[in-house]
Image: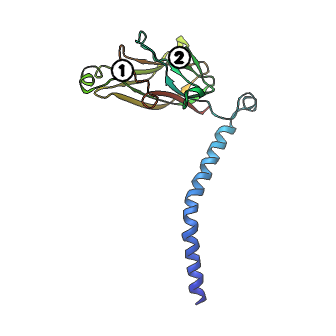
Amino acid sequence: MEMAEEGYARRLRHLLVAPVLRVVLPLSFLGLVIYVLCSQLPAQQQLLQPPECDVAELQLNHTGLRQDPRLHWQGGPALGRSFLHGPQLDNGQLRVQRDGIYRLHIQVTLTNCSSSVKNIVSRRAVLAVGICSPAARSVSLLRLNFHLSCTVSSQRLTYLAHGDTLCTNLTLPLLPSQNSDETFFGVQWVHH
């Protein structure tokens, strides 16, 4: 009888502990990876910069007709879900302050995009993201065609150097939606 109770207790412990281990072990591993990545910064750089990673989530800053193919962005706490920590805005364009690998993401939705407009206009609509400054190092990072859609979105990992300025261009005269749920742009530093 005692052996049966002991076997039952062992199975019960296994049933209770196994799900906990399935959650705790991956979370512990993730914490270790984050610790290792952030602790690899040189000591001097750690003193000059906070240990948090550089990040920006931007909203469109647009008023009136578009005379320039570049989309201009804005960010900050007064805008709600928009923020800048590390990168800076230079005339509506995002400039990074630290070398490293960044996760870049963008989504643009065309405004007043009905089915008739979609068939005519969006076939030739293109959204491009690139490094536009310094001029000696212009590089195309993303080129997205709208095809028969009103929205394009993408993300990628890319190396950016201190001072690189990212420009986002949309085919003229198309108008992007100013709704922050439909049109947004951001970067996140992930590794040096």
Rendering quarter of residue 78: top right
Please tell me whether mark 1 sits on a helix, a strand or a loop: strand
Give the residue type at disc 1: Val
Give the residue type at disc 2: Gly
| Residue nearer the viewer, 39 or 5 | 5
Q: Residue furthest bottom?
A: 1
**Mark 2 nearby-residue class (10 Å; few <14, some 14–19, many ≥20):** many
Task: Give the residue at mark 1.
Answer: 126
Image-based side of 92 in relation to 99, left or right: left
Rendering quarter of residue 108: top left
| Residue nearer the viewer, 112 or 151 | 112
| Residue nearer the viewer, 59 or 190 | 59
Task: Give the residue at mark 2.
Answer: 92
Vertical order, 4 against 150 (above or below): below
Image-based side of 117 in relation to 66, left or right: left
x%, y% of residue 37? Answer: 64, 39
